[in-house]
Each structure stands twice: as structure tokens, then as C-alpha cells.
Image: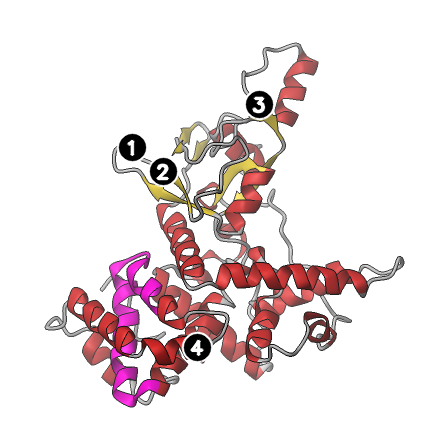
Amino acid sequence: MPLDRMESWESEYCLLSCSTAEYGYIYENDEYSTDFLVDDALEIIRAKENELRDAEDQVQLDDLLRGMLLHVPSAAGARYVAVALRLTDQEGTDAVVNIAKAWLKHLFFRSPFLNSLFHQPILYFDHLLNPDLSVQAMSCRIDISDSQTPSTDNTAHEIGSLTLTENVAAREDHRCAITGCVDRLYAQKLRKQGDPIPAGAQRLMEAAHIIPFPLDLPAESSKLVFRDSVHTLDMFRDWTTLDIRALAGEKINSPANVIYMTYDECLRFCRFEFYLEPDTDEPDGYQVKFHNDYDTLSTGARTALVNFKALEDPKIEVPDPRFLAAHAAFSKVLHLCGVAEYWERLEMQADGDIVSGMNDESNFANRLSAKLALLAY
């Protein structure tokens, strides 16, 4: 197996009635191929489909589990899910439902991806459990007096004398990597210098993180929040094979984790409306994929071929394929099980509730968002 799972298995077996040895026996047993375990897990889901569907009104837990098996970033992640389902099935239907809810809460609602998609993922999970509770009422339950805005300084990582944004802009030749549109500010700079302006539509650009900024773990004295955060980090690692702890700090701010794109594309990428799928014919090439037939890029195109090219001087690497695979996996699962659509509805409600609770002298929304971002991670 590509990762040593023993140190993180505890996050899973504490949700089950088994030991790390029992979990490891199946996971490391070569007699159980990953394909066999996945097929077995899919049969477990099929047999318990009705119970999984009835467990949540807004999210299809059966599709959540199928998506985690079929749209996983790696075979190791599929094996991780399949083993957990095999063990929970031995305990009964309730155990299978509970592990699905645990992944929904700890992996998908606390994922670092979701800190950028929505500012209230954990409150939305509370809403899922308590649908009669309004988003405004949930917001009032949060103490925002000591909120701290997490740093998102995208100039922290420098190569030579250039900032992160300048580096990825140079890598993409000052064009949106997705649409090919020209950086409007760069075009204005060229115009003032009297230099030729590249052909093409001009747009405002963003240096968009593939995996958003992970926030520091809460203090261990905050036992419940600390425990939940550890669950999330371990589950994220086991399913994606990415160790978020290794990306903490400035490492998250590298060209390998950033794509230069228009503001519109950045927003939609962060909302998982589209993802990048590797193109088999192009090294470091990707196809833009939408979930809905009616969605298009800001240029009106339904798809696009995206080619990333590293720079040698200064050395600026292309986006890490593992990061793009993790983003694509979350995108597929969230749409398959209905979470993305559910959050969109709740976000519209939250926007209305928060605006109605603001006054002219407060910066309530920003403070609340900062606090919720900390809670979400």
C-alpha cells in the first residue's frame, strides 16, 4: 500500500466495533484484491439502499458511498472505504448508516475544500440534523467575539523576486489557464508601456488554490473540536492519499497548488461546478468537465483543453496532478449524492438571514465567516 495506514486507522475503528489489528488484517491481506473488496462494498450498498436513503432527506447516503468507491482519487482510497464498509456490514445496517454519516460530517463537511466552497459547512450539517433550525438561529449560536481571520496571503511563496501570483501568471503567459482570456491588468500595463497587447478577451484574474488554505488545528484542550479535526485530517489522507499536515503553512502557497484563471472560473471551480480530468493524449493536459448539461465557461464554451507548462527560469512547476485528482473526486461525489445542490439552497437562505442581521456599523458577516471557517476545519 502507498501509505502507512496504522497511525490513522484509529479514526475509523473508533467509529466501529473493531481494533486496528482487525482493520489491518483485511486492509493488508493480499488475498482480498481491491476490486473484490469494492465489488463487495457496492453489493452492501445495494442491499441497504433503502435504509441509507431513508436516513437523510437531503443527501443520498447510498450515492455518497458509491461515489467514494467509484470516483476515488486512488485505488488505496477505494480499498480504505471498502474495508470500512465490510466491517460495518458485519455489525448491521445501523453501523453502515453511521459510517456514511461520519464520512459526510468529518470528511465532506469538514474538508479543507469546503472552507472555500461555503463558510458554514458544519452549521449546514447541524441544519441537516435539525431541519427546523433556521440558519440565522444557528449563526446566533456561534460566539464571534474572538474570531480571527485566517491568513490567505497568496504572495507568501516567492520564487526569485516574483510573488506567487506573478509566478503563476507568468507560467500561464498572463492568460486564464481555463479560457485563454488575457489578464486585464497585464494588458493595461502593456498599454501604458506602449507594448503590443495579446489578442483575446480581457478579464480580471485570480490565483486560485486547488486545495484551499488549511487552518491550524484547534488547541488540544478543546477536546471535541480537536478530536473532530483529527478525524477529518485522517479521513482526508486515507481517501485522497494526501497528507494535509504536510501541506500546512507556506507549502500550500506554491505554484503546484495554484491555477491562474478568471474571477468567474475561479468561483465556479471552488464551487465544484467543473473539474479538470486528465487528457490521455496530452502530458499535463486536462479536459474541463461540467456536471450539468446547461453549464458553460464564461466564454460560452462547454469544455476546453487545458495545458500546463512548467517554467525553467525561474523554475515554476505545473499544478500537482494529485491535488487536481482530489478536487475532481470531491466534485463528483458532492454532485452525485446531492450535497452540492443542498448547500446551494442553504447558502441562499444563509445570505438572506445574515444580511437581515447586520447593521450599518457592524462587520458581522466577515467576522462570522472567519469564525465559521475556523470551526469548519
> Badge 2 local density, few (<14 within 10 Å), some, or many (20+)?
many
Q: Which residues are magenta?
A: 65-93
Q: Secondary structure at mark 1?
A: loop
**Residue 367 can be seen in this image:** no
Tell me the amino acid under the disc marked 3. Ala
The C terminus - image quarter: bottom right
Within 10 Å of disc 3 (Cα), the crowding (few <14, some 14-19, many 20+) is few
Rounded to the nearest angstrom, the CA distance separating label 2 from label 3 is 22 Å
Looking at marks 2 and 3 on the same chain, the residue that comes earlier in the sequence is marked by 3
Mark 2 to mark 1 CA distance (whole Å): 8 Å
Task: Determine the residue positioned at 51% across, 68% down.
Answer: 109
Q: Earlier in the sequence, mark 1 or mark 3?
A: 3
Please tell me which residue is depicted at 15% across the width and 74% down the height of the picture: 29
Horizontal and vertical percent for residue 335? 44, 57
Q: Nearer the viewer, mark 2 or mark 3?
A: 3
Of 251 and 16, which appears nearest the observer? 16
Query: In the drawing, what numbered circle is on residue 102?
Result: 4
- In terms of depth relative to the viewer, which is nearer, 376 or 126? 126
Looking at the rendered structure, the kind of residue marked 4 is Ala
**Element marked by disc 4:** helix
Q: Residue 201 bears which disc, if any?
A: 3
Instruction: Describe the element under mark 3 as helix, strand or loop.
Output: loop
Instruction: Tell me which amino acid carries mark 2.
Output: Tyr
Which residue is labeled 2 in the image? 286
Which structural element holds mark 2?
Answer: strand
Left or right position of 309 against 363: left
Mark 4 and mark 1: Cα distance apart in space: 38 Å
Label ID, residue 282: 1
